[in-house]
Amino acid sequence: MPQSMSEPTLDVVAIGHAIVDVLSHADDAELERLRLSKGTMALIDADQAENLYAAMAPAVEVSGGSAANTAAGIASFGGAAAFVGKVRDDELGAVFSHDIRAEGVEFATPPADKGPATARCLVLVTPDAQRTMSTYLGAASGLRPDDLDDEVITRARVTYLEGYLWDPPEAIDALRRAMDVAHGAGRRVAFSLSDPFCVERHRDEFLGLLDADVDVLFANEAEVMSLTGAGYLHEALEALAGRCELVAVTRGPEGSVVVDGDAVFEVPAMPVDEVVDTTGAGDLYAAGFLYGLTHGADAETCASLGGVAAAEVISHVGARPQVSLSQVADQAELSLAKPTGDDHRP
Amino acid sequence: MPQSMSEPTLDVVAIGHAIVDVLSHADDAELERLRLSKGTMALIDADQAENLYAAMAPAVEVSGGSAANTAAGIASFGGAAAFVGKVRDDELGAVFSHDIRAEGVEFATPPADKGPATARCLVLVTPDAQRTMSTYLGAASGLRPDDLDDEVITRARVTYLEGYLWDPPEAIDALRRAMDVAHGAGRRVAFSLSDPFCVERHRDEFLGLLDADVDVLFANEAEVMSLTGAGYLHEALEALAGRCELVAVTRGPEGSVVVDGDAVFEVPAMPVDEVVDTTGAGDLYAAGFLYGLTHGADAETCASLGGVAAAEVISHVGARPQVSLSQVADQAELSLAKPTGDDHRP
């Protein structure tokens, strides 16, 4: 790729769905009555969203969205992050915009002034701390190429894309253009597979991305196995080795494994007193990893930073950090100096 | 007052501000920077609300409002409650409406289709668990007499009014009309003084209400002292004795005191492991008291039910109960049978 034209002023720009989570409690019987399958994420339309919301217990609204959570995590480490995603000019759109900016993340995507409402994810938390999610994507899936500001992409060391967004043709055009602009400016592209069903729907395209368009791949075990068709994790990792620069695979309580060229590192998970809510674990792992990567860390340190961020977010309800991740990293003796030049690799 | 025309089908209809709370954390230095006085509630206009929100940390949205919290508490005890209050037909209005209905409270006030947005209370929680509140009343203060459905008032054993609403002339007209309709149907009227500043602004009117319009008065120590001009609580209670049927005064960790005709009962507070957030304590005390009153309990039992409800709500963040108050009352051996007739008094 060509050399960067100017010094980057952002660590990461994350592109994904702009979503507000609507959280309430339910028991198993209620999930059954609502015909929801525990622990899954299902997409619903506006009518379904209205009916489900009407049936839900009193709720709490908190900003979410996978890539947006990652951007919030990077800012919490002290990194410079931006987010690109689409809200409507309604009140939940104002809530999303306020929260992401209040996290210290640059967010300048113009809100839609017509069309579907801001996306919401209706979350039912069962007594076993599992989350059952029904997402109305609304305005979020309306991201188009002209919502992308090339200048933000060129300013960022890494452009991070959420696989969830890879569905509406215009959003795919926007993501492809973001990758082109980033590589044109000599920057890296990172991609999250997001969800095994996402991988099923787009397997060939996602595999194609690895060879030319994506430098850093984030996934969990199920997603890399679905992507490669491998029966075991080590086979999946072998199949992916060399196809992109770095592959980071999260393994829940077993930590993560990173493929860095020919080398494979296993990094244990950070111990957690009590796992309260696992939502956002993958998003925050990516935040720590990318914060490390844009601050000159080696792949193992990147994975460890991902681990401390994931450990923080699973120890409370909610998918965004509740304490400063830079302090958490300090306590884990994982702090990094601010980079003086560009990435640690030539 | 005339005899009731038909059997009541509601225990309590509560009338007040329909507000969504927007909660975030701040430290003392931040309060100072924002020129907010810790622990107080201040009214702000739309511009101030926008500026303060922009300066606030990432937030969580939860439905609130004093009388609405009381209605939610009564429903949580298993009582039949309705709420009357004004939202705009915007998304926070939908959030408020969803939550109050999901608590099991009847809510049929038509939302405004123009004018100011749904009310919000911007809450900054400091590390000492205190709340500093800035309230934009918006649509909530737009309640007018024709928003009241006489049929709801006549169906309720008690009409409960929030003193906070006693400000815009049309809202005062609405509250006066509610009292007239309730008494015309042979029902009781309960009134909360809400806030010492509220009492300062409307002292003479509030005193006037006690003689003819209000049967049950709720207040805290500061409010009854401000109302009566007394220097000590016992003087305030003496001044109020006989002016209305029941006066219930909350005293924080010291419990409450009830004036019932000539008799005065002191009821100790329920012990709480840890006081996390005192917001809603008065609202939930009123809920327990009114649940008891509409279910044939004597004044002391009413005060004890108020105490268990207040104890539940101060043991967590948020001003609405998080567990079933009917179970809490069972555990405290304070459960009551469903009433078979009208109120316990002739």
Image (cartoon, coloured by chain):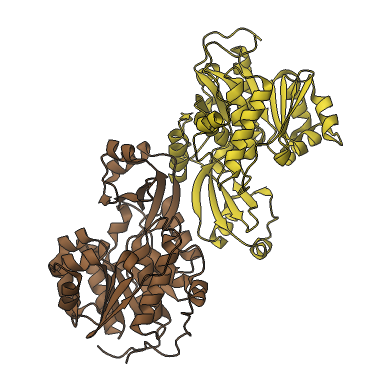
Chain colours: A yellow, B brown
A123, above or below B219, in the image: above
Residue A298: x percent and y percent?
66, 19
**Whether residue A123 is situated above or below residue A34 in the rendered picture:** above
Q: In this view of the protein, can residue B156 be seen by the observer? A: no
Which of B175/A288 is in front?
A288
Residue A94 point in image, percent of width and height? 43, 41
Q: Quadrant of residue B268?
A: bottom left
Front residue of B250/A95: it is: B250
**Image side of residue B83 versus residue B205, left or right:** right
Task: Please provide percent x and percent y for residue B314.
Answer: 41, 61
Look at 35% across and 51% down and name the residue there: B130
Q: Quadrant of the C terminus of chain B?
A: bottom left
Q: Is residue A313 visible?
A: yes
For the point 63% across and 62% down, the residue is A27
Give x and y (percent) for residue A290: 61, 25
Q: Quadrant of the N terminus of chain B?
A: bottom left
Between A181 and A286, the one nearer to me in the picture:
A286
> In the picture provided, is A346 more to the left or to the right than B243?
right
Relative placement, left or right, of B183 versus A314 is left
